Every structure is written in C-alpha cells, then in structure tokens.
Amino acid sequence: MSKVSVLMAVYNGERFVEETIISVLNQTFGDFEFIIIDDGSTDSTKEIISKFDDKRIKYYYFENAGLAKALNRGLKISSGKYIARIDADDICYPERFEIQYKFMEENPEYVVCGGFADLITEDNEFICTYLVPNLDEDIKKQMQIKNCFLHSSTFYIREKAIEIGGYYEPIKQYFEDYLFFKKLLFNGKGYNIPHSIIKYRITVGSINSSLKNRRFKKNVKKIIDRGYASVQEVTQLKKTIKNYSGKRKTSQYYLLLSRLFIRHQNNLLKAINNIGIAFKAEPLNPYVPITLCYCFIWYSFNSLRKFNCCESTK
C-alpha cells in the first residue's frame, strides 16, 4: 500500500495533462499511487495518458458527471493515508510531496496542508506568486470570507475526507473545494507551506476567470455557510454558468490577465495587449473599457508614487 494517493480528475485535458503527469512522476518522494479519473473526455486525453509506462498510474474512465463526483470516485478507489490533489493543467514542483508528507507526519493534529503557488498563463508565462494565509488561526478566520486553499496544492488525510462525505456533488465543479475544506477544518488544523509548491495555471475554462456575478457570489456564500444547496440554488448556479458564452469566457479570461499583470508587475504593455485580445473576443463586453480605465489609473498611480519616492531621496 502506498503512503500517498495522488488524485487527479481530468476532462478533455489533452493540452496540458502530459506536462502535469510528468511533474507528478518526477517527484523526489516516490511512494505514491497516481489515481487518474477521466471524467468522460472526448479528446485525446486517454491516448496521452496511455503513453506513460509507470506502474504507479491507475487510470479509470467514467461518463462525465462533474468534478465533485469524479473526485469522490477517486477517494473511494485510493488507498493511501494521504491524498495529494493536482489538477490536470497544473504543475508540481519536484519536492512538493516530500515537503507536505514530512509536515503532515510531524504534525498529526493537521488534516490538510496546502501551499503558495506561482500563477502562470495558458502559455506558461509567469504572472506572480499567489499568497494565502499559512497559519491555522488565520486560515480559519479567512475561510469565513473566502477559500484559503488552492485545491491543486492540497495534501490531506483521506480518512477524514471520507468521514465528512467527500465532495458535495450537487454543486459539481463550481466551488466544491471551498465547501470541502471548510468542513474538513472542523476535524483538525490547516496549514499552507509559505512558498510556492506548484505552478497554478489560469485558463479560459477556469470558473474563477469567468464568473464575476454578484448574485452568484451571494448564493455561494449562503451555501457555504449552510453546508448544502437547495434544488433551486443548484438550478440558479447552472443557469448562471450557462449564461456565460464561449466568447464571454474568453474575453473575461484576458481581462483577468490584464488586471493581474498591472497589479503584480505594473506592466501596462502586457495589460493593454490582453485587453485588446479580450475586445476581439467580445467587442460588446462592458468590462473591457472598465478594465482599460482601471489599468491606466493603477499604472499612473504607481508611476507617480515611484516618482515621489525618487524625489524624496534627493
């Protein structure tokens, strides 16, 4: 029996899944089984995975049922003491599992351990290092407002995950991790390694890059606080997601990149380039001019602040 079960669910992941698998197989900690749940992919995902000749890989194909269901299937199949999560478009740094396994073994009062991440674009371009609270007290306080764990970076006790019922399937992939970790923290402490242990890829298909709807966020908060969703709320969530067309998702993705590049790199050129792509994707997107103004204001403010700092040192 392996000490760790690496759990990855994938749906039409042909573009990035090979790089993800390589990053898992190249870990300095090798005592793991690699559970891959294919959630009904219709592209070449299966063929790509089949190229890997490694006994640690255990591949399972199911009809599409959503991320939460896929992960629960993986939890039942896995046998390790710990679950190491990774998404099919992210990348593990080589020592990730070794660091997290050592922490969890030395601190048995903890039920989950995540970490910081380096955010990258679809084209592997570095954006910034994403920081999250790392101490248990701060995590639990912030979890009342937002999720403090990057799902793809987490390493948690399998038995505790099963005890809380796993992932809440009615909400599928919308915020299944937030609800899961909030419940898990009732069973022990949480921690985030205070440096980057993964590369976290922001993609067009990312829910977080496309949903900025206030009603959606309000519904999420209600469900998280209550611990479950009504049939009406699930219907509303699905409707909200459906209302975002492919063009809107693409446009919102590049607007998100523009904001990230201006906030974390103060790079106006990259911001404007991404706004231009967003405009081409959906010329009538009302957030395009708003984001353009935001980026110019941010850049001007930071340039003025730097100028004043230089003046004060003379």
Image (cartoon, rainbow, N blue to C red):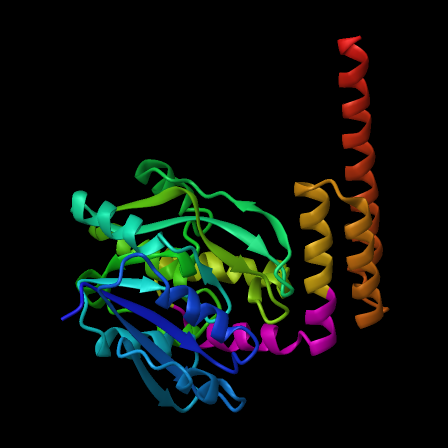
Rendering quarter of residue 129: top right
Image vertical order of residue 147 relative to residue 169, above or below? above
**x, y percentage for residue 277?**
80, 65
Q: Outermost residue toward the left?
A: 1
Q: Which residues are magenta?
A: 229-251
Foreground residue, 163 or 9?
9
Residue 233 lies in the magenta-colored region: yes
Foreground residue, 60 or 17?
17
Q: What residue is shown at x 72% (from left), y 71% (from top)? A: 248
**x, y percentage for residue 11?**
48, 81
Residue 195 lies in the magenta-colored region: no
**x, y percentage for residue 107?**
19, 43
Identify the image quadrant of the N terminus.
bottom left
Rendering quarter of residue 73: bottom left
Q: What residue is shown at x 79% (from left), y 38% (from top)? A: 299
**x, y percentage for residue 207?**
56, 67
- Side of 38 relative to 131 (left or right): left
